[in-house]
Structure formats: C-alpha cells, structure tokens
Image (cartoon, rainbow, N blue to C red):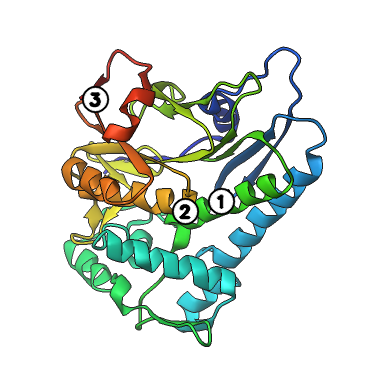
C-alpha cells in the first residue's frame, strides 16, 4: 500500500503564504513590524502596521508559547498531557476555561466537534506526532471510537479539576489555536495597535483596517491548488477572525484515497461528505476554530444551519465539485479569485 504524507505547510512555503493570505504586502511609506516563529505546530506570523510594536509582538508570542506549553496534547508535561496520562488533573483557570469552551462547542454541534478525539487521531497516525500513518482495521476503529465522547468528561468548577474515563484522551488542537489568536488579539488591543494581521497557520485575525482605511483582504486557500498557495476567494475583513479547516492540511493517501485529520466521530473515520474546506468568520477566533471543524464534519446543509444559529458568525464551505456555499451575511464580502470555483 503506497502512502503519501503531507504536512499542512512546508516552512518556506508557509512563510510566503502567510503574507499572501493576508493580502498585507507593504504599501509605500507605511511602517511595519513583523515577526515569525514556529508554534502550535504551525508557522505563526504577527504583523503590526505601525512603528515601535516590537514589545507587543514579544508579549503576544510569549502568550502563544505559554498556551502551547499548557494545552498541547503532545507534550507529556503539559496540563492536558498530564490529564491524558493520569485520567484526572487540576487545571489552571486558563486551561479549564478552554476545555469548558471546547465541551460547550461539542454540545452545540452535537459532537461534530469533539475534543476527546485523541484516541482516533493516534490510532490513525494523523495526530501530528505518530510517524506511522495507516488505515487501521475496522475493529480497532470501533474500539477507539468508543473512547470518544465529550459527555464523559467531568469538570469540577470548584476545584478546577477535569476527569476522564479510562482510555480517553483530550486534544484541544481544534480550539486552542483559536484561543491563542484571541489572546494575541487582546494584547494588540491593550497596546493600542490599530492595524495588524495575525496569522496562526490558517487562523487569521484582521485587526482594524489597512493604513489607507480599506478593509483587509484575506485570501482563502484553494484546497486543490498545485502548487500550493493559490486562493479560491478573497474576503474583506476588519476586526474579525477567519479560520479554515481543510482536508489538505494533514493527511496521507492509501490506494488512491485521501485520509485527513478531521474525524467524523460517529464513524471513527475521516469525515467524507463532499466538503473539502470550511471557513468561519467571527469576532471570536476560539468559536470560529471549533466551528470550522464542526461545519466540515456536518456537511453543507447542516453546517451552514449551525453557523446561522450562532450570532455574529459567517461561513464559506467548499465541496469537491468546486462549488462554494456561503451564509447570507458574508456573500457581499466574497470576491472569487479562481474561475474554477463558483459561488452558489
């Protein structure tokens, strides 16, 4: 069985795409402070369009690094790592808050987003850490799926303690990056930065406007472009986050079939409903992060209905036949960038 594995981005390609995706190339005479680091398993680029913002960037990167150290399921000494290893852990207020948000989003989506997906991602080897990617036997999938159930996570708000059933595992990867973006956004606001773009590998925050007063133009990656880096659409955003989940970010191929990292926990297999990319726009990146996964799993009709039930959120969903579906509130801010895709 021939298998082909791709990461979400290669380092060099991601650096180029980060600037392109944000549509934030420097304009004549403008001040810009930008910095890039590898955190949360992706390339993070923070750009402030004003001088003297170095300290703001330092604070934001420090906060993002702290979130990774506390919440990564792949770090044994993180709080989530200890929770998974021991089955119970007393969490800081920060980690407890994000886990509680994750469970609330799981309930809202009927489990389409589920932070207890770790047994499945480890079994399949698409957890970002396991070297052996494989299509596991059906009985093993069934056993792992039985360990995935957000309803079985017990939280004690008085003690800040989380408890899991034996064999379960929490992975906040589908929401922690959104929270990190929100925290960086908060720091930029506190420091009075009025024009900036924060790119956390598919989680983009557009702060304020460009220095000419126009909204930011955020490119949404073409999920089937070769070579990578092209966009199928451009969104006009201001003081908003745009978060995309796609089947091109982490996957492997076996016998001509693509197996990606976004699982339908009702089956134990990667979601397969025709959706290849889901983008959520919101003033809350944490919500957008979880919703992008949920919409991808639910499919076009149910996914868009979910988004329309959440105040202040919009969505773009791309299907295999290159049709683009949008919630009503964002249609007039979408500019198609590829003739191969059609807005429905």
- Residue at image mark 3: 322
Which comes sooner in the sequence, label 3 or label 1? 1
Q: Position of residue 118 (x, y in %)?
A: 38, 65
Q: How crowded is mark 3: few (under 14 residues within 10 Å), some or many (20 or more)?
A: many
| Residue underneath mark 2 | 286
Q: How crowded is mark 1: few (under 14 residues within 10 Å), some or many (20 or more)?
A: many
- Seen at 74% across and 19% down, the residue is 30
**Residue under pointer 1:** 182
Alpha carbons under labels 2 and 3: distance apart: 27 Å
- Residue furthest to the bottom in view is 159
Whole-percent x, y for residue 40 in the image: 56, 52
Q: In this view, does 45 lie above or below 215?
A: below
Front residue (pair 78, 336):
336
Instruction: Look at the numbered discs 1 and 2 and tell me whether their residues touch, using CB distance below 8 Å.
Output: yes
**Relative to 155, is 78 on the left or the right?**
right
* Left or right for 148, reference 20: left
> Upstream in the sequence, badge 1 or badge 2?
1
């Amino acid at each position: 069985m021939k298998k082909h594995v791709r990461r979400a981005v290669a380092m060099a390609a991601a650096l180029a795409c980060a600037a392109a995706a944000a549509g934030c190339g420097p304009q004549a005479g403008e001040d810009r402070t930008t910095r890039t680091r590898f955190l949360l398993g992706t390339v993070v680029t923070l750009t402030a369009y004003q001088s003297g913002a170095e300290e703001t960037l330092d604070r934001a990167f420090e906060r993002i690094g702290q979130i990774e150290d506390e919440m990564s399921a792949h770090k044994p000494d993180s709080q989530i790592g200890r929770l998974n290893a021991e089955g119970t852990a007393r969490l800081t207020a920060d980690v407890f808050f994000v886990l509680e948000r994750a469970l609330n989003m799981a309930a809202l989506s009927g489990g389409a987003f589920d932070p207890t997906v770790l047994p499945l991602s480890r079994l399949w080897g698409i957890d970002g850490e396991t070297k052996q990617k494989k299509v596991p036997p059906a009985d093993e999938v069934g056993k792992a799926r039985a360990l995935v159930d957000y309803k079985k996570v017990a939280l004690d708000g008085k003690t800040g303690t989380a408890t899991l059933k034996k064999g379960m595992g929490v992975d906040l990867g589908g929401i922690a990056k959104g929270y990190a973006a929100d925290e960086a956004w908060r720091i930029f606001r506190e420091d009075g930065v009025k024009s900036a773009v924060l790119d956390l590998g598919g989680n983009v925050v557009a702060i304020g406007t460009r220095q000419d007063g126009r909204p930011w133009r955020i490119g949404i990656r073409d999920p089937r472009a070769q070579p990578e880096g092209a966009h199928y659409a451009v969104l006009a955003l201001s003081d908003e986050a745009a978060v995309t989940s796609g089947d091109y970010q982490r996957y492997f191929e076996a016998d001509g079939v693509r197996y990606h990292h976004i699982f339908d926990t009702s089956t134990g297999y990667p979601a397969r409903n025709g959706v290849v990319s889901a983008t959520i726009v919101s003033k809350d990146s944490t919500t957008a992060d979880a919703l992008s996964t949920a919409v991808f799993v639910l499919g076009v009709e149910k996914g868009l209905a979910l988004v329309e039930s959440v105040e202040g959120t919009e969505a773009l969903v791309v299907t295999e036949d290159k049709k683009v579906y949008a919630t009503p509130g964002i249609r007039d801010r979408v500019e198609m960038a590829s003739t191969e895709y059609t807005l429905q």
